[in-house]
Image (cartoon, rainbow, N blue to C red):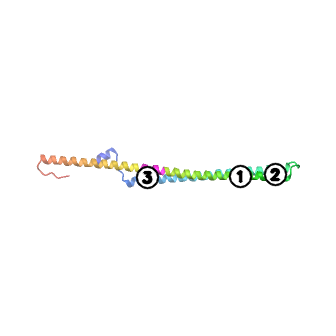
Amino acid sequence: MSESSNASGDELQPLDEVLEKWCLENDQKHQAMAQIDDYLFKLKNYVRSEADQSIARKMHRRSLEMERNRLCASSDVHAALKTSQRILQNLKHKKQEESRARMFALMDERDTKNIKRDRNTLLKQKLSAVQDAIKAERVRMKAEAEEAQGFLKSIEAMESRMQSWFPVQVPSV
């Protein structure tokens, strides 16, 4: 029986080896995913810092333009009106900054949830694949055990036929 299974190339692997191999592959994939997550985090921070610098430059330019406009404005406009316009403009810019900050926070939260959900889904898929492989291995082992039982029965039947033909005692296998 062992010759026929070796000839067909279907060797049984112990369950511990299969699980160990799966765990090693799983750990390697988790390390790769962690590296990707780290890269995405760094990239997001870089993009955010670039956006913040760009916003700061724009704000500085706007404040310079506002200052120039204030200085160049005609003298017939009341100073209180100019001050109120400047205050309104500053409030508008602050609201825009706050909305951008909220948007980035929501994006971070959404990305974190998506990453966790994707990891959980991937782990569930891998676990179900391993469970299916274990079930298939059990079915295969059971079939081989039944085949071995059939082979033993055929040997016993042959032995009994030989004993009926030859009354001499034949040593049992």
Q: Which x, y percent locates residue 81?
A: 83, 51
Q: Which mark is residue 22?
A: 3
Cα–Cα span, label 3 and label 2: 66 Å
User: Label 3: how many residues lie within 10 Å, few (<14), some (14-19) or many (20+)?
Assistant: some
Q: Which mark is residue 103?
A: none
Q: Which x, y percent locates residue 75?
A: 88, 49
Q: Which mark is residue 67?
A: 2
> What's the amino acid at mark 3?
Trp
Q: Earlier in the sequence, mark 1 or mark 2?
A: 2
Assess whether residue 15 is covered by the magenta stretch. Answer: no
Magenta region's main secondary structure?
helix
Q: Which x, y percent locates residue 171?
A: 17, 52
Secondary structure beneath label 2: helix
The residue stretch that appears in magenta? 122-130
Q: Which residue is mark 1?
A: 95
Residue projecting furthest to the right? 76
Give whichever of 172, 120 is nearer the camera.
Answer: 120
Assess whether residue 123 is covered by the magenta stretch. Answer: yes
Q: Is residue 159 left or right of residue 101?
A: left
User: Label 1: how many residues lie within 10 Å, few (<14), some (14-19) or many (20+)?
Assistant: few
Name the residue: 77% across, 49% down. 62
Front label number (1 vs 2):
1
Name the residue: 29% across, 50% down. 145
Give whichever of 34, 124 is nearer the camera.
Answer: 124
Secondary structure beneath label 3: helix
Q: Is residue 84 left or right of residue 37?
A: right
Asked if disc 3 and disc 2 are in contact, CB closer than 8 Å, the reply is no
